[in-house]
Image (cartoon, rainbow, N blue to C red):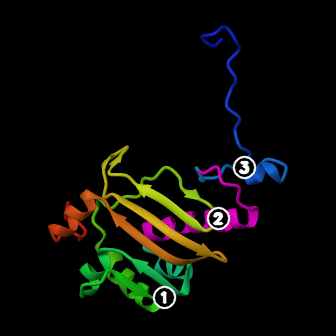
Amino acid sequence: MSANGGTRKRPTRLPSARMLQGGIAPMSNNLSRAVVPTETSNAIERVYSEWDRAWSNDDLDAMIALYAPDAVLESPLVPYMLGGDRGVIKGREQIRKLLDKAAPRKPEERTFHRRGYFTDGQTLVWEYPRAAPDGEQMDFFEVMEIKEGLIQAHRVYWGWRGVEVLKADAYYKGSD
């Protein structure tokens, strides 16, 4: 009952793309309420899951396969690992060069706790929060532009904990 004695209405939940197409689909990690066609939703879910699995396990071939040939990657890790003063690289060859240097050096606090993602069918975003169930981790916010199932652009925003690791020149295994 509401304060004026009437019955309180429950908010209407927007149907997901899967619900609109009928039937019940497996649970998705998409936290958004955007209606995304099933094929696009599946491609986004694949990138989200496979990218994290590949980076967690240093499976660089699988990671590179997720990027378009002319993809752009932006991250503070670029000048840190490759030198220079720009955090932008383009193409699978340059991305592979970065990952080849970064993967074997990932500090132990570079863990992979996250709670899902948001997408509108073109942009995929998620957070690795500093506070994780097992303690602190390096904090990042990932943004990917996806087209035809491939990453076209990837921007990585570092939180204060991640920046502290770079400032201390501690992006090495066993550095925490």
Q: In which quarter of the image is the C terminus?
A: bottom left
Residue linked to disc 3 = 16
Alpha-carbon distance for marks 2 and 3?
Answer: 12 Å
Q: Is the magenta stretch mostly helix, strand or loop?
A: helix
Residue linked to disc 2 = 121
Pick out the residue farthest to the right.
Answer: 22
Q: Quadrant of the N terminus?
A: top right
User: Which residue is rendered at x = 43% and y = 72% of the image?
Assistant: 155
- Counting from the top left corner in percent of width and height, residue 33 is at 64, 49
Tally of numbered tags: 3
Label 1 near label 2: C-beta < 8 Å?
Answer: no
Residue nearest the viewer, comparing 23 with 174? 23
Q: What residue type is labelled 2?
A: Gly
Q: Note whether 39 is above or below 70 in the view shown.
A: above
Alpha-carbon distance for marks 2 and 1?
Answer: 23 Å
User: Which residue is rendered at x = 37% and y = 52% of the image?
Assistant: 129
Label 1 residue SS? helix
Q: Which amino acid does label 3 sit on?
A: Ser
Query: What residue range appears in magenta?
Result: 32-56
- Counting from the top left corner in percent of width and height, residue 90 is at 44, 88
Pick out the residue farthest to the left.
Answer: 168
User: Which residue is rendered at x = 43% and y = 56% of the image?
Assistant: 127
